[in-house]
Structure formats: structure tokens, C-alpha cells
């Protein structure tokens, strides 16, 4: 299955998607160091350094022959700072949220089956949250805050995940992954070979701060210092409100790390090693975020920390990606209300109908004369148009028989030739007459069907009937109510409702469409 990721960063989410079974068609980010990181580790990935707001997604789609609706997954880690509790939370007024408008354009052009948006927890409580959700059109939206520590990550890191399911793909509800029972702590991930090159990349504390940190036990912070030392360290913020528990924070081997930020030496988010009096190294940062040890990072020391601190933890990325992959598999590769081998054969036969020539074309010479006169066309052009019209009529009839063959092969149903009915249930209590065009239920066709229904009612008083005009245009559905009036025990339903009635699945009609779209001969 194919995916595109924008604002991809250093690859935390991309690794999870790869493990889940997705193939990356494009990874896009404006940060050159992030893209260089991806190119170092996965040279076969199509990693492009460009601002999403200037990227021509339509031209890219033409280049790789990707049509709207074909992409399985579009994921995006849009900038989180405008919605972060740690930031000013300017939301959609922040210039960085121009990328969200660009994301909406990507969604509009690609029309992917699933979209995945990751952001900070604060987005859910922001005043713009409802506007963001409502701006994503034609998708059923699900969202949930997930904690990375619940998914194979030695870190408390809450992020909101927004999953959108294309309404034309599936109406099934998306369910987020269940929490893992085992919770990792730092002891599980900080056993690192000291010869590791990235273990040697770190910041150093100045001597005064190091002396203070030596007095703080594992799991402690500035509160473990005496009042004089606290005042010296906190200065003016000593009397301010707030817990300030991130200041002079020493981690504990027996607990998960607090959320890693883009630097381990920021005053409010200090991340000191549980045992050694120093900040976490680049390798320790990467371990806590779940990156494999062979994953290389590009750029300066600060750029490495920045990339890792902004990443989606790999364990969390694997969990959400596998859940999405499983959802896609269920909705695209298998239909549980019919033998899929039979369905494949019916689709194959239907496609062969397009290859069959039209024989014995009857031309009404008077119609031909009037048509050529009115449309101002030559005889040769008329013959081509008429051939296409007759071929289209032939295909429409074949599609009607395709539906009939699909429905009579559904589990619990069979073909039924008595009383001019098409199919019935195994108990022969529900009889269905399929109609492919509206006008077949007018006048004589209508009267004949009424006679057949009355005849069955005499023989089988408990019988139910369903009459259907097989159509795809939902705007025409209402015309079905004009059929077969004043007949007891008659139902007038749409195509999608008929499939639901026969299969018991609310998404059967769309499932069949998706199955056909993904069919490979």
C-alpha cells in the first residue's frame, strides 16, 4: 500500500509506516537536515526538501500516474508550535499554519482513502480545533490523544492523532489501537554502548549548574535543593506560579522520561541523565524516541537534537500505522458476504464485455437524417456516435446482469426463475426483481410485475418483495418512490440499501465499488 507523508521530519512516523507495510511515494519537508537524514538512511525513499506551500502536488501526481482516490494514506505532522501549551498558542493566526491550508489542498487533489494528522495534545483544547476538523470535507473524522508510553516507548508523550476516512472508501468506524500492558522505563532503553558515535555527541553543564545537579536525586528537580540554592537557580521565577518541575530535572531509571523537547538543556525542560550529571546524549535521545541504533542524523549537534525531539516516537508510529493498515486491508482486500473467487470471475467477465464488438447495428434511416441535420454532422461521424451509443446500452444491460449475478451469489441467497423473479433467500420468503432502468417499470412492465407479485402472494402469503432501479447517481434515488404504488408488502429501496438488505452490511455497496477499483486481473 502506498503513502505520502508531508512535514515528515527525521522519519519517526515514516519508520512506523514502513514497519506496518506502507511504501512511501513521497516524503516532503522544508528542513534540509531532516531530508538529508532520510536520504542517508533510506536512499530509495523519494525524499524532497521543499516547502509544502510551494509544492505542485498535481504535477507530481501526473508524473507518477497517481489518480485521485488511489492513494491509501496521506500523513502529516503539521507544525505543532502554534497549538502547543509551551508556546503562545496562536493557532490559525500563526503563519506556520499556512501549511495546514496547503495540507487541505493535498487532500482535495489526492483524495486519499485515509488521512493521518499528528499534533500536540494542546490542539484538542484550542479554540480553532473545531474549525480544523470541519475544514476537512468528505471525510469521517476520528481523533484521540495517545500517550507514547502506552506503545513501546520509554517516554510520557501525549499527542493527538486525527484520522480521516474517505466517505467514498468506507463508512466503517476507525478504532484507535489498544494500549500495551507493558510500560517501558528508561532502564529498558539506556543500556548503550559508550563507543557509539552518537553517544559522544552531547552538551555540557557549566560548573555552577553541575554542582547543583549533583545534589538532585534520580526523579528529583529543583525542589530538592535548599531554599538558598533554589533562589540562586530560579532567580525571578522563584516566586512565580506553576510547578516548574522541568527545571533542573534529573530523570529516573525506573520511570519513563518526560516529553523530550528539541533540546535537553532548556531551562524549563532540563533532561539530566538518571545517573550521570550531564544532559542526555543524541543517542539516548534517539533511543527514548525509539529510533533504531543504525539510524543516522544529519546536521550540527543542535540540529540532531531538534530533529529527534520533534519526531513521532517510533513505537507509537508503528501502533497507529498498523491500525490504519489493518483498517485498509479489511476494507479493500476482502468482502465477507460473497465468495471472493466468484466475485473475481464476475468482475473479469464484466470487463470482457467491453472488449466484445457490437453486431447487427440497426439504423433508423429517418432518425439518422434528422440527427445529421440537427447536429450538423456527417454520415461517418454519425455512425461512430451511434456505435458508441449502442455499445453503452449493451454495457448498461451487462452491468444489470453483473448486479444480479453478484446478489444471487451472496451468502444466504440464490437464483429463482419462477414467477419471473431474479433471486430469493434460501428459505424462499423474500423475492427480488432487479431492474436496470427506470422506464422498465412503467406501463406494461409495471403491470406485468404487479401480476407476478399478486400470484406469489396467493401461493406464499408471507412473501416480501423488493423492486429496485439499479442506479449510481444518488441524486436520482428519490425517483424510486414512483414505482409500484398501492401494492401490499412491497419495498422501494436504492441500490446501496438493497446491498445492505441482502448482505447485512451497511457498507456493502461501497465495499463492492472499492473491490472493483482495486481488482487486478
Image: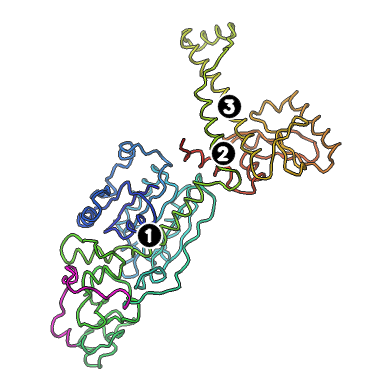
In 3D space, how far apart are the residues under numbered discs 3 and 2 (Cα atoms)?
19 Å
Q: Compare marks 1 and 2 and give the one earlier in the sequence.
A: 1
Mark 2, residues whose alpha carbon is within 10 Å: few (<14), some, or many (≥20)? Answer: many
What colouring does the structure picture have? Answer: rainbow
Mark 3, residues whose alpha carbon is within 10 Å: few (<14), some, or many (≥20)? Answer: some
Q: Compare marks 3 and 2 and give the one earlier in the sequence.
A: 2
The circle drawn on residue 118 is: 1
In contact (CB < 8 Å): disc 1 and disc 3: no
Mark 1, residues whose alpha carbon is within 10 Å: few (<14), some, or many (≥20)? Answer: many
Point out residue 205 in the picture as x, y percentages from the top left corner: 16, 79
Left/right of residue 158 with respect to residue 204 in the rendered view: right
Point out residue 115 in the picture as x, y percentages from the top left corner: 42, 52
In 3D space, how far apart are the residues under numbered discs 1 and 2 (Cα atoms)?
38 Å
User: At 47% across and 10% down in the image, what residue appears?
Assistant: 377
- Front residue of this view, candidates 239 and 60: 60
Point out residue 293 in the picture as x, y percentages from the top left corner: 25, 65
| Local SS, label 2 | helix
- Which dot, 3 or 2, sits closer to the camera? 2
User: At 20% across and 64% down in the image, what residue appears?
Assistant: 304
Residue 473, above or below 176: above
Q: What's the magenta region?
A: 187-211
Left/right of residue 371 with respect to residue 264 in the rendered view: right
Q: Compare marks 1 and 3 and give the one earlier in the sequence.
A: 1
- Which dot, 1 or 3, sits closer to the camera? 3
Which residue is tagged 2? 343
> Residue 215 lies in magenta, yes or no?
no
In contact (CB < 8 Å): disc 1 and disc 2: no
The circle drawn on residue 396 is: 3
Amino acid at each position: 500500500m502506498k503513502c505520502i507523508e508531508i512535514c515528515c521530519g527525521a522519519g519517526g512516523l515514516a519508520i512506523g509506516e514502513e514497519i506496518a507495510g506502507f511504501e512511501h511515494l513521497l516524503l516532503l519537508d522544508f528542513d534540509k537536515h531532516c531530508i538529508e537524514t532520510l536520504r542517508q538512511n533510506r536512499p530509495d525513499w523519494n525524499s524532497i526538501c521543499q516547502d509544502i506551500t510551494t509544492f505542485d502536488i498535481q504535477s507530481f501526481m501526473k508524473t507518477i500516474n497517481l489518480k485521485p482516490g488511489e492513494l491509501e494514506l496521506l500523513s502529516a505532522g503539521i507544525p505543532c508550535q502554534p497549538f502547543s501549551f509551551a508556546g503562545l498558542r496562536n493557532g490559525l493566526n500563526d503563519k506556520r499554519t499556512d501549511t495546514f491550508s496547503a495540507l487541505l489542498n493535498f487532500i482535495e487533489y489526492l483524495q486519499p482513502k485515509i488521512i493521518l494528522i499528528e499534533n500536540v495534545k494542546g490542539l484538542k483544547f484550542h479554540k480553532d480545533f473545531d474549525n480544523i476538523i470541519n475544514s476537512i470535507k468528505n471525510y469521517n473524522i476520528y481523533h484521540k490523544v495517545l500517550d507514547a508510553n502506552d506503545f513501546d516507548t520509554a517516554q510520557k508523550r501525549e499527542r493527538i492523532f486525527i484520522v480521516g476516512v474517505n466517505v467514498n472508501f468506507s463508512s466503517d468506524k476507525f478504532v484507535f489501537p489498544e494500549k500495551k500492558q507493558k510500560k517501558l522505563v528508561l532502564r529498558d532503553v539506556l543500556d548503550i554502548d559508550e563507543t557509539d558515535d552518537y553517544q559522544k555527541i552531547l552538551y555540557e553543564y557549566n560548573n555552577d549548574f553541575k554542582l547543583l545537579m549533583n545534589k538532585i536525586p534520580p526523579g528529583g528537580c529543583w525542589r530538592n535543593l535548599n531554599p538558598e540554592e533554589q533562589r540562586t537557580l530560579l532567580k525571578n521565577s522563584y516566586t512565580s506560579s506553576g510547578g516548574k518541575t522541568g527545571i533542573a530535572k534529573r530523570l529516573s531509571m525506573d520511570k519513563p522520561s518526560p516529553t523530550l523537547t528539541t533540546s535537553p538543556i532548556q531551562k524549563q525542560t532540563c533532561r539530566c541523565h538518571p545517573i550521570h550529571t550531564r544532559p542526555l546524549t543524541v543517542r539516548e535521545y534517539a533511543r527514548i524516541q525509539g529510533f533504531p541504533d543504525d539510524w543516522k542524523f544529519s546536521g550540527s549537534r543542535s540540529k540532531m537534537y531538534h530533529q529527534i525531539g520533534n519526531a513521532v516516537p517510533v513505537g507509537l508510529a508503528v501502533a497507529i500505522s498498523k491500525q490504519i493498515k489493518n483498517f485498509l486491508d479489511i476494507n479493500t482486500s476482502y468482502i465477507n458476504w460473497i465468495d471472493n473467487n466468484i466475485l473475481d470471475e464476475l468482475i473479469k467477465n464484466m470487463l470482457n464485455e467491453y472488449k466484445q464488438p457490437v453486431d447487427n447495428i440497426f439504423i433508423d434511416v429517418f432518425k439518422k437524417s434528422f440527427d445529421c441535420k440537427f447536429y450538423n454532422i456527417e454520415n461517418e461521424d454519425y455512425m461512430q456516435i451511434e456505435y458508441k451509443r449502442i455499445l453503452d446500452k449493451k454495457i448498461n444491460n451487462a452491468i444489470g446482469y453483473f448486479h444480479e449475478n453478484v446478489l444471487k451469489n451472496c451468502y444466504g441467497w440464490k437464483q429463482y426463475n419462477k414467477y419471473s423473479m431474479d433471486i430469493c433467500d434460501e428459505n424462499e420468503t423474500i423475492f427480488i426483481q432487479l431492474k436496470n432502468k427506470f422506464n422498465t417499470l412503467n406501463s406494461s412492465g409495471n403491470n406485468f410485475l404487479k401480476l407476478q407479485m399478486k400470484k406469489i402472494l396467493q401461493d406464499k402469503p408471507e412473501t416480501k418483495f423488493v423492486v429496485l432501479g439499479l442506479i449510481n447517481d444518488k441524486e436520482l434515488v428519490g425517483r424510486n418512490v414512483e414505482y409500484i404504488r398501492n401494492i401490499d408488502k412491497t419495498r422501494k429501496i436504492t441500490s446501496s440499501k438493497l446491498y445492505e438488505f441482502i448482505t447485512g452490511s451497511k457498507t456493502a455497496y461501497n465495499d463492492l465499488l472499492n473491490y472493483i477499483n482495486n481488482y487486478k486481473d
